């Protein structure tokens, strides 16, 4: 019985630690971002979804990061879920970087000493633009999944990891050449990992490359 009780308490504690807590916070331009908060700690990570996803899509990755002692905030961009904000009906022109910055600043205001961002597709582009528009040191690191900043990458203020599948493509053709061009302009320290396959951004987590992608993200976020 004592052993069973100990196992039950361990399971209960794990469930409590990885359970998400819904919350919301304002953006600097009057928007309101809905998010799920996982875990606690002084190292924060914002998870920024792609166009076919929402904050719930990060649940497995968030729990892995919590197991590595990160405090994780998965956001819905304005116009997704219950998040709202100016420009939300103009997908190509909406200031999504403001949503990322609001999330980073929320974590900083609630105990995180460093905050990094993992972004898929347009969420990665928004994360890059947020770094460029941020205060120095505000965003520690960025993981771009099938993405690169919209703004000139040479202005990035964060260490960057670019992960892209070699044959990832859209209607305009392969994404790798454009991502590599932005990677080449980005300041050091930076890394580029090109995977085999066609999966775009968060769709990588639905392939046999999923475990490797997550290992690379954790490695990048934890190296000195």
Image (cartoon, rainbow, N blue to C red):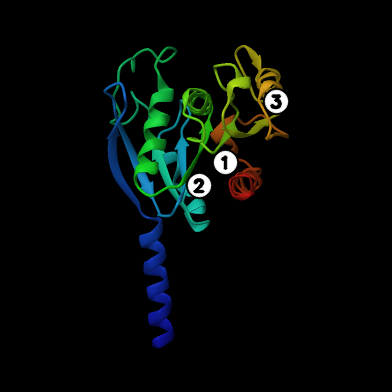
Front residue of 222 and 84? 222
Q: Are marks 2 and 1 in contact (CB under 8 Å)?
A: yes
Residue 55 image position (x, y, % from top left): 40, 37
Secondary structure of the residue carrying tag 2 is: helix
Question: Which quadrant does the N terminus fall into?
Answer: bottom left
Which element is circle 1 on?
A: helix
| Residue at 46% across, 32% down | 49
Say whether residue 64 is left or right of residue 95. Answer: right
Mark 2 packing: few (<14 Cα in 10 Å), some, or many (20+)? some
Provide the residue designation for mark 1. 205
User: Of 114 and 207, which appears nearest the observer?
Assistant: 114
Q: CA distance from mark 2 to mark 1?
A: 9 Å
Question: Is disc 1 surrounded by few (<14), some (14 to 19) or many (20+) residues within 10 Å?
Answer: some
Which labelled disc corresponds to residue 167? 3
The Cα atoms of the two marked residues, 3 and 1, are separated by 16 Å
- Which of discs 2 and 1 lies nearer the camera? The answer is 2
Whether residue 149 is situated above or below residue 137 in the rendered picture: above
Q: Say whether disc 3 or disc 2 marks the residue closer to the N-terminus.
A: 2
- The numbered disc on residue 104 is none
Callout 3–callout 2 Cβ contact below 8 Å: no
Q: Are marks 3 and 1 in contact (CB under 8 Å)?
A: no
Which element is circle 3 on? loop
Q: Earlier in the sequence, mark 2 or mark 1?
A: 2
Residue 55 visible in the displayed image: no
Give the side of residue 140 with respect to residue 75, left or right. right
Question: Dot 3: few (<14), some (14–19), or many (≥20) neighbours within 10 Å?
Answer: some
Residue 61: mark? 2
Q: Tell me how far mark 3 sits from mark 2, CA to CA.
A: 24 Å
Q: Is residue 55 left or right of residue 140?
A: left
């Amino acid at each position: 019985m004592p052993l069973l009780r100990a196992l039950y308490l361990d399971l209960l504690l794990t469930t409590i630690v990885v359970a998400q807590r819904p919350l919301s916070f304002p953006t600097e331009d009057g928007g309101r971002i809905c998010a799920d908060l996982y875990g606690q700690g002084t190292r924060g990570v914002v998870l920024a979804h792609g166009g076919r996803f929402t904050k719930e899509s990060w649940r497995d990755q968030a729990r892995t990061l919590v197991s590595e002692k990160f405090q994780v905030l998965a956001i819905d961009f304005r116009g997704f879920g219950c998040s709202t904000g100016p420009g939300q009906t103009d997908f190509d022109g909406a200031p999504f970087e403001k949503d990322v910055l609001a999330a980073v600043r929320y974590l900083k205001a609630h105990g995180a000493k460093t905050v990094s961002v993992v972004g898929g597709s347009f969420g990665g582009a928004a994360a890059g633009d947020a770094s460029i528009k941020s205060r120095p040191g505000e965003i520690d690191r960025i993981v771009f999944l099938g993405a690169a900043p919209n703004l000139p990458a040479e202005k990035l203020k964060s260490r960057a990891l670019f992960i892209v599948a070699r044959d990832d493509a859209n209607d305009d053709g392969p994404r790798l050449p454009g991502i590599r061009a932005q990677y080449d302009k980005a300041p050091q320290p930076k890394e580029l990992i090109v995977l085999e396959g066609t999966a775009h951004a968060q769709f990588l987590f639905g392939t046999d490359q999923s475990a490797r992608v997550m290992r690379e993200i954790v490695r990048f976020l934890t190296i000195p």
